Amino acid sequence: MTRRGFACLLLALAACGPEVSAPGTVTIAQYRSGLTMAAAGGCDTSIASGLSAQLVEELNCVTPNLMVDFSGPHVTLYSAVLPYLAPDAAQDLEAATLAQNDTMTISSAYRTLGQQYLLYKWWQAGQCGIQVAAVPGSSNHQSGRAIDTPYYSTWKPALTARGWTWLGSADLVHFDHLASPNIASTSILAFQKLWNKNHATGQLSEDGSWGPNTESAMSQAPTSGFAVHGCVTTGKLAGTITQQGTTTPLSGVSVSVGASSVTTTATGAFEFTLGAGPVTVTAAKAGFTPTSVTRTVQVGNTVSASMALSPLGANATLAGTVVEAASPGTPVASASVTVAGRALTTDASGAFQAVLPAGTVTVTVSKAGYVVNTSAVPLIAGQTKTVQISLATSTGDQPPVLELSSPAPFTSFDLSRIVVAGVAADDSGPLTSLQLVQNGAAAVTWPLVGGAFEVPVLLAPGLNALEFSVSDPAGHTTRVTWTGAFRAGFSGLVHRFDDAAAVIVDADLTLFDPDTQVALGTARSGPDGRFELEASAARLARLHVEKAGFTPRDLLVDVSAEQRTALDVGLTPGDVAELRFLEPSTEGPFEAEEITVSGVVTGFEVAQVTVNGQPATLLGSGFVAHLPLPEGRTVFEAIAEGAGGQSVRGQVVARRPMRDVVGGCGAAPGGSLAALGLLLLLRQRLRRCASASPMRFS
């Protein structure tokens, strides 16, 4: 022991204070290519700075401007600090520095999921002198609204005057901006999304929950970051290719967009990720007639481009002539002909021709001054059908003709973005626009080109009623209603969390409103472990999954307004509900009027925790409460309750010294005050003697 250390020990013994031990040597983080988070050593979280930067980037991809960089001349940052906070927190932080006309030193701010994983891993291993570390996803510093400043007493008035809350004697340097949203679960979601961008298989459920799968993925994550990262600037084009006139899917169809090409799966499905803008999609297969559609790709959305192919032997030729009804020998040139979604124009002899799928087709012929003629024409495969269509002179009192050609009514879709096609014609001449009223909302005007239209529609979850209408110059209006459904919700698999092949049959799934706890929908996994759960609205919801013999699981899910979401749920077998305290880690004694009680609950999703009857703050599966610590011995009882009625409780003891000390150093009259004075002097000297103290990461 050094002479200085021996002097410190003598002072401690003389004052009857606790012995202070310095932490062990701190190992410098070792950087190397390919290093995973599980293998990251040392005691410096900046070893994962590459991954941390990507996680912050991903947060702002999930929600733009969720986190902002608060660095600037108004703050001085410790080297490992990530200068990110919620926008309001950053604004009120700067306001506090301006009010005090000073520069604030900040020792900690936002901590990424990767950094918290390292601290928790090192704490579990007994490394780095860390006294306690919260479970990843449950730390205050992952909330995006917390800072630490070593000069807390100087800054406390200015910070608290601008919305910051001082944590108190339990953590003197810590302040929270409680008016800002807690993004702890979003920080988990950001990692899950980043992982999925880089892994076609072994994807994580994007539920914002820290579980075995997410923990395993984090352990494999590279400290330097992933190859693929950044915000989405593309959209998806997806659909199914079927055989014309049936619901039979066609596999092996070559679907191309420009130079990109994919082949349909066994279910006839295909998908492209493309930049925003209009594209032409072409589907081709040997033995079938190729077909194309035009769609507009939107950033972050999935647009349907489903098509039907006709077998070559099933095609027929339609050859027609348009003539005047009063004079059949007089052809009508430049008449508009629409059939099977195609827009044609008659030549000088009144003729038109098209190769079409066999079956009955609707032919609509129009020209200004003539009554619109709509005819149903049967086509036989391999044959040519010749027709003569007569147009009668118009009297000017005919209503417009409006026909919807696709999709078929009463169809259900897994994508919300569909295209409704049809034709509109009138005896006054070409119409320029139509109107669409969706589910009783305000009318939207859509242009007509050559009498044909393809209107992109965003279906609402559930049943939709689309009313199309066209009006002619004389004020006549024709309306047609199309009805179809968007099957919003989730499709997926329930399985053991560690083995996707071990499916779980008859698991019960219930979707709840997270605020009112009202059930929004139910489902049960089938013999193959799969489930279909429909939702009536796009919203944030809580999905509760349970099966006897497995730990129930609650997921915060987002019912997409764009598509039916694939969601696999892993359940852990046989876990026992448990409440484990993280702090206080010892009984004490503690020289403080207030103490922090924190812990973690496992075995079920926590709805609320109370400590000695006082509500605790929930941080993922963790909780924290700041409570008065009276003199003497105090028992703190925490009770955790789950949304499904589960509960678990635990107790921890903390002790605070009594003011009047009997015996020992304080035995003489007035000894209590003397001991207090000596203790204060001792603590000042011990601070100078001790080169460092154990680290605490809540």
Image (cartoon, helix red, strand yellow):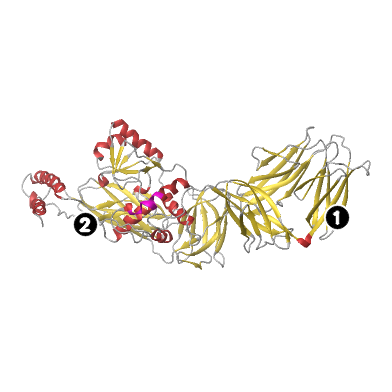
Spatial separation of the CA atoms under disc 1 and disc 2: 92 Å
Q: Kindly identify which numbered label has been placed on residue 453.
A: none
Tell me which secondary structure the magenta stretch mostly adopts: helix
Q: Which residues are magenta?
A: 47-53
Q: Secondary structure at mark 2?
A: loop
- Residue 303 % position (x, y): 61, 50
Q: Residue at x 18, y 54 (%)?
A: 22
The answer to whether residue 452 of the structure is visible from this angle is yes
Q: Which residue is mark 1?
A: 385
Left/right placement of residue 96 relative to residue 205 reads: left
Left/right placement of residue 150 relative to residue 333 reads: left
Q: Secondary structure at mark 1?
A: strand
View extreme (front): residue: 259
Q: Quadrant of residue 136?
A: bottom left
| Disc 1 crowd, CA 10 A, few/some/many (<14, 14-19, 20+) | some
Q: Quadrant of residue 680?
A: top left
The answer to whether residue 161 of the structure is visible from this angle is no
> What's the residue type where badge 1 is placed?
Lys
> What's the residue type where badge 2 is placed?
Thr
Q: Kindly identify which numbered label has been placed on residue 25.
A: 2
Nearer to me, 260 or 239: 260
- Disc nearer the start of the sequence (1/2): 2
Nearer to me, 319 or 117: 319
Query: Which quadrant of the figure contains the N terminus?
Result: bottom left
- Residue 206 % position (x, y): 48, 54
- Residue 567 % position (x, y): 52, 58
Q: Quadrant of residue 175?
A: top left
View extreme (left): residue: 668
**Is residue 649 highlighted in magenta?**
no
Q: Residue at x 73, y 63 (%)?
A: 287
Residue 442 vertical position relative to residue 264 in the rendered view, above or below: above
- Residue 4 % position (x, y): 10, 52
